[in-house]
């Protein structure tokens, strides 16, 4: 089967956004492989033994997307940017829930010596990154969107530029500045936790 054209996907997105449920049925088989690639990319950053699997992440994102009835999809890149954001939210919510459960309900007491041997899980890293990205969005929304689409969504510079309706040079500049800002923010978080 040949790869669907971006134009074909955009047409189906526009039709679906306009209320054509049959367009969604035709769209999903065309984008499912790319959604799995996004999910695999996310899951590759998680610790081994993570209880959420790639397929479950794709399915949860799909269920949330289906409930978005009135979205005016711009194009394929816009769809995948929103999908990436949704997957990020799902994983962050999952990590927060796991941390919440670890802080109480049914947890066994351990001595301070035992606790010193525990390792911080990558879910905490994801939560810290999400919090830093949320703070960046308050300071500069576009830079946060660039990070989300490039880092989490795997979109190319050209695709990000298309979604945000800015030049490729602007995307590259935002990408560089956002990475520096996030690194500084995450380092400050680690330093303040020690």
Image (cartoon, rainbow, N blue to C red):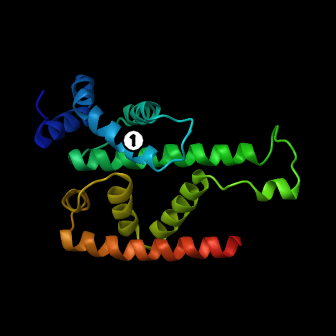
Residue 159, horizontal then vertical, whole percent: 21, 56
Q: Is residue 34 left or right of residue 104?
A: left
Above-or-below relation of 193 to 66: below
- Seen in the picture, residue 84 relative to 36 is either above or below; the reply is below
| Residue 73: quadrant of the picture | top left
Q: Position of residue 97 (x, y in %)?
A: 65, 43
The residue drawn where x is 25% and y is 32% is: 16
- The residue at the point 32 percent across, 50 percent down is 81
Q: Is residue 30 above or below residue 120?
A: above
Q: Nearer the viewer, residue 106 or 76?
A: 106
Q: Which residue is mark 1?
A: 39
Residue 79 figure quarter: top left
Q: Secondary structure at mark 1?
A: helix
Report the residue at 39% width, 41% height from top.
39
Q: Residue at image x 39%, y 53%?
A: 152
**Quadrant of the image occupied by residue 71:** top left
Residue 167 appears in the rendering: no
Q: Which quarter of the rendering shows the N terminus?
A: top left
In the figure, is residue 166 to the left or right of 186? left
Binning the other alpha carbons within 10 Å of mark 1 as few (below 14), some (14 to 19) or many (20 upward) gives many
Please tell me how many numbered marks the rendered image carries: 1
């Amino acid at each position: 089967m040949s790869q669907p054209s971006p134009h074909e996907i955009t047409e189906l997105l526009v039709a679906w956004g306009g209320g054509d449920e049959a367009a969604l049925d035709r769209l999903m088989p065309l984008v499912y492989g790319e959604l799995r690639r996004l999910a695999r990319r996310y899951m590759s950053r998680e610790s081994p033994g993570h209880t959420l699997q790639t397929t479950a992440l794709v399915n949860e994102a799909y269920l949330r997307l289906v409930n978005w009835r009135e979205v005016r999809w711009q194009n394929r890149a816009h769809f995948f940017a929103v999908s990436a954001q949704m997957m990020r939210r799902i994983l962050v919510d999952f990590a927060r829930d796991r941390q919440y459960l670890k802080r109480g309900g049914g947890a066994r007491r351990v001595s301070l010596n035992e606790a010193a041997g525990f390792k911080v899980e990558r879910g905490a890293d994801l939560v810290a990154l999400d919090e830093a990205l949320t703070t960046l969005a308050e300071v500069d929304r576009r830079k946060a969107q660039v990070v989300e689409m490039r880092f989490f969504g795997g979109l190319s510079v050209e695709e990000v530029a298309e979604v945000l309706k800015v030049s490729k040079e602007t995307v590259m500049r935002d990408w560089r500045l956002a990475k520096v800002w996030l690194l500084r923010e995450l380092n400050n978080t680690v330093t303040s936790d020690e």
